[in-house]
């Protein structure tokens, strides 16, 4: 796919991977449509992208609300007449041991990481089926491949995302001309762990030697790679981890 003029909706675009992807795709000529809750960050990102010569619009979006995600996709379709790519990127990670029974945090992770992705598919799929073209990308995690101790529910949501995307890939028909891709990053240096509340884990992190991590731009590069493949190539899954160092 040549990126010029492609309409790309990105959830969780206000920081980290979503923000890096928005900048990279806009720099390549895509019209990016940004969704997240923090409006001031979206406005700043829109200005940055425009300063860099790109095109961006945004709509404040809470992916736990189906009507918000629909409104985000509608914003893209109304502005540009179509949606080429939906990137379900918004996510939260609230690690804790199961014995702490932080059930409201489990609920939040299910709502954002799984239901948010489902709402993204529900919003993007109908216009894509109508236009007989589209690409849905969802961000899972290496923890959707290997169950993380102390972050089991997060792992469950990320594994579920892989299941949903695999099922979507199998369901769409060749004539639908829709690709489905899951990208699973390893550790990325972003704001993801800033919302941790578990005191034992927070104390542990004070003394924890942080291993190698990716930059958000590395995952943005993976997204670009997936999108720039020729029409006959479908990248179904990608696992991108930092190279171990001594
Ligand atoms: P960030 O915390 O930097 O970004 C998360 C994004 O999700 C923010 O833009 C945030 O925006 C958005 N978000 C959170 N809750 C909601 C909500 N209810 N509605 C809409 N947007 C929401 O972290 P990352 O960039 O690292 O995370 C991006 C994705 O990558 C996530 O799915 C994460 O699970 C995944 N991932 C991250 C890894 C890492 O090590 N960082 C590793 C593997 C996967 P706002 O608060 O403004 O709404």
Image (cartoon, rainbow, N blue to C red):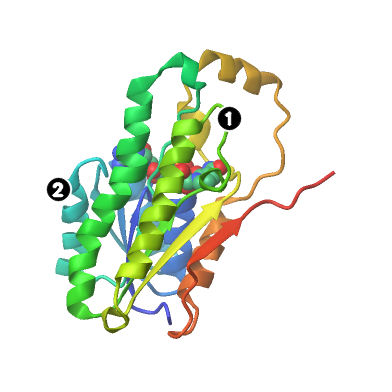
Ligand 1 is found in the corner quadrant, namely top left
Q: State the residue at coordinates (16%, 61%).
A: 74
Task: Assign the N terminus to one quadrant of the image.
Answer: bottom left
Mark 1 within 8 Å of ligand 1, using the beta carbon = no
Q: Nearer the viewer, residue 227 or 81?
A: 227
Q: State the residue at coordinates (25%, 42%).
A: 62
Asked if residue 20 is positioned above or below residue 232 in the image, the reply reads above
Task: Assign the C terminus to one quadrant of the image.
Answer: top right
* Image side of residue 77 versus residue 243, left or right: left
Q: State the residue at coordinates (51%, 60%).
A: 220
Q: Is residue 189 visible?
A: yes
Query: Where does the image place residue 15, in percent across and percent down from the top left?
Result: 44, 45
* Image side of residue 140 versus residue 38, left or right: right
Mark 2 within 8 Å of ligand 1, using the beta carbon = no
Q: Quick one: label 1, few (<14), some, or many (20+) residues within 10 Å?
A: few
Asked if residue 8 is positioned above or below residue 195 in the image, the reply reads below
Q: Secondary structure at mark 1?
A: loop
| Circle on res. 245 | none
Query: Where does the image place residue 183, in percent across and percent down from the top left?
Result: 50, 58
User: What residue would you read off at disc 1?
Assistant: 149
Asked if residue 236 is positioned above or below residue 130 in the image, the reply reads above
User: What residue would you read off at disc 2?
Assistant: 67
* Image side of residue 17 versus residue 47, left or right: right
Q: Nearer the viewer, residue 89 or 78?
A: 89
Q: Nearer the viewer, residue 66 or 189?
A: 66
Query: Where does the image place residue 140, in percent across and percent down from the top left?
Result: 47, 50
Measured Cα–Cα span from mark 1 to mark 2: 34 Å
Q: State the residue at coordinates (33%, 78%).
A: 5
Viewer-nearest of discs 1 and 2: 1
């Amino acid at each position: 796919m040549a990126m010029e003029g492609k309409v790309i909706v990105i959830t969780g675009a206000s920081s980290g991977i979503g923000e890096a992807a928005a900048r990279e795709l806009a720099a390549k000529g895509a019209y990016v449509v940004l969704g997240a809750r923090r409006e001031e960050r979206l406005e700043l990102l829109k200005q940055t992208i425009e300063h860099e010569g790109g095109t961006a619009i945004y709509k404040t979006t809470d992916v736990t609300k189906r009507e918000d995600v629909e409104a985000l996709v509608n914003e893209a379709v109304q502005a540009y007449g179509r949606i080429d790519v939906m990137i379900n990127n918004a996510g939260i990670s609230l690690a804790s041991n199961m014995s702490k029974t932080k059930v409201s945090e489990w609920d939040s992770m299910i709502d954002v990481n799984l239901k948010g992705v489902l709402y993204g598919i529900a919003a993007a799929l109908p216009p894509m089926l109508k236009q007989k073209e589209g690409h849905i990308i969802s961000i899972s995690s290496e923890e959707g491949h290997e169950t993380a101790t102390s972050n089991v529910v997060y792992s469950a949501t990320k594994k579920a995302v892989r299941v949903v995307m695999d099922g979507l890939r199998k369901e769409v028909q060749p004539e639908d001309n829709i690709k489905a891709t899951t990208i699973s990053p390893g550790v990325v240096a972003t704001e993801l762990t800033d919302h941790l509340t578990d005191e034992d884990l927070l104390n542990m992190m004070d003394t924890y030697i942080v291993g190698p991590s990716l930059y958000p731009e590395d995952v943005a590069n993976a997204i670009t790679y997936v999108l720039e493949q020729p029409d006959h190539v479908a990248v179904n899954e990608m696992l991108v981890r930092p190279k171990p160092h001594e």
